Amino acid sequence: MPEAKQIRMKGLVIKSTGTSYVVHFEDGTTADCHVKGNFRIRGIRSTNPVAIGDYVEVKKESDNGKGDITHWIVEVYERKNYIVRRATNLSYASHILAANVDMAALIVTVRQPETSTIFIDRFLATCEAYRVPACLIFNKIDLLSESELCELAALRDMYGAIGYPTYAISALNDASNINNQLSTLFEGKVTLLSGNSGVGKSTLLNAILGVDIARTGAISSVHHKGMHTTTFSEMYPLRGETGSTHSAWIIDTPGIKGFGILDMEKEEIGHYFREIFQISRDCKYSDCIHMNEPGCAVNKAVIDGRIALSRYESYLSMLDDTCEGKYR
């Protein structure tokens, strides 16, 4: 019986289908690839040991007898970074949203649906923890009333003062403004797009790419929340890019309802809130966790208005998670 031939190739994981992965190779071709049942990455307990954005080594096996070709992912190359959250209903397991990203963009809406500041702050803290630059893109501004526009301005002022770039767009009705504001934002980068269901990630992605690639959905009229349209994560090359592993890519992810934190000790959570970390240097005790300790500079800054109350409440909710193991 003829022996199976084996060829090894390096590629970029650009799509996950749940049971297999689409890998993009340096010659521009793609292939559906599989992993063995016991495939794991040392040191990471994850529901998805292979993630979107991973560079992998693929073994191509061809059976000369039958002509069948199978692609196996046999190695994941070292990641420069990744963004991870606690997997739903699995308290101690992680879910890797993406690997090897240059920027994470959170799509936020003030209404239809409303993105909570707790969700925003958990996302930003996770980006800080994994050293991924982040920005906020406020979408659906054409739907906002005058009072809601004031709320939007206040949110942009708050996050801008902390150091996070913010953008305000209408992905559905103002494509030219998207090009003006975001044309250079994604250039030369691998960018993760994330957000709650219904905030317009797919609509924004279609506007950026210039073609209708991602399905879009409506908002539930009963619950005012989005319904999932993106089922699996996928990477898309930007317009004008050749699609090589060195091009600019955008990663579209399924809508997220909650953002459970993982691997954060309560003493370090304050490090991932920029303003809290900066002011905490003036606390009386070096191990202060900014609750009821005497001489806490952070508590004083909240009272004085130098730290936004919503940010402090988000910090406390994450402290609570480390004690209770909650998923939010």
Image (spheres, grey):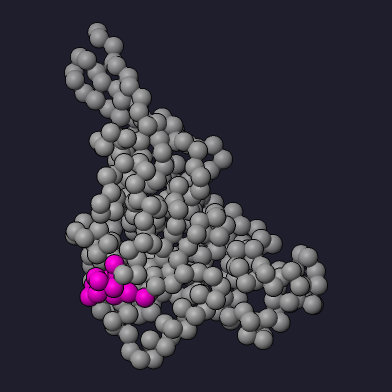
**Can residue 123 be found in the magenta stretch?**
no
Front residue (pair 300, 96): 300
The residue positioned 24% from the left and 64% from the top of the image is 207
Extreme residue toward the bottom, this view? 146
> Relative to 215, does residue 77 appear above or below in the rendering?
above
Label tally: 0
The answer to whether residue 320 shows anywhere in this view is no
What residue appears at the point 69 percent right and 62 percent down from the top-left corner? 267
Residue in the foreground of this view, choosing between 218 and 162 = 162
Query: What residue range appears in magenta?
Result: 168-179
Name which residue lies at 27% across and 27% down. 70
Coordinates of residue 97 in the picture (x, y in percent): 42, 53
The verdict on residue 174 being magenta is: yes
Quadrant of residue 317 within the rendered picture: bottom right
**Rendering coords of residue 233 (x, y %):** 33, 52
Q: Is residue 277 left or right of residue 194?
A: right
What is the x, y in percent for residue 57? 40, 31
Please determine whether, in this image, residue 44 is positioned above or below residue 268. above
Q: Nearer the viewer, residue 320 or 100?
A: 100
**Quarter of the image with the N terminus in it:** top left
Q: Along the horizontal axis of the image, is 254 left or right of 273?
A: left
Image coordinates of residue 2 in percent, x first then y, are 25, 9
Q: Quadrant of residue 169?
A: bottom left
Q: Is residue 287 visible?
A: yes
In this rendering, position of residue 91 left or right of residue 281: left
Residue depicted at x 56% and y 60%: 128
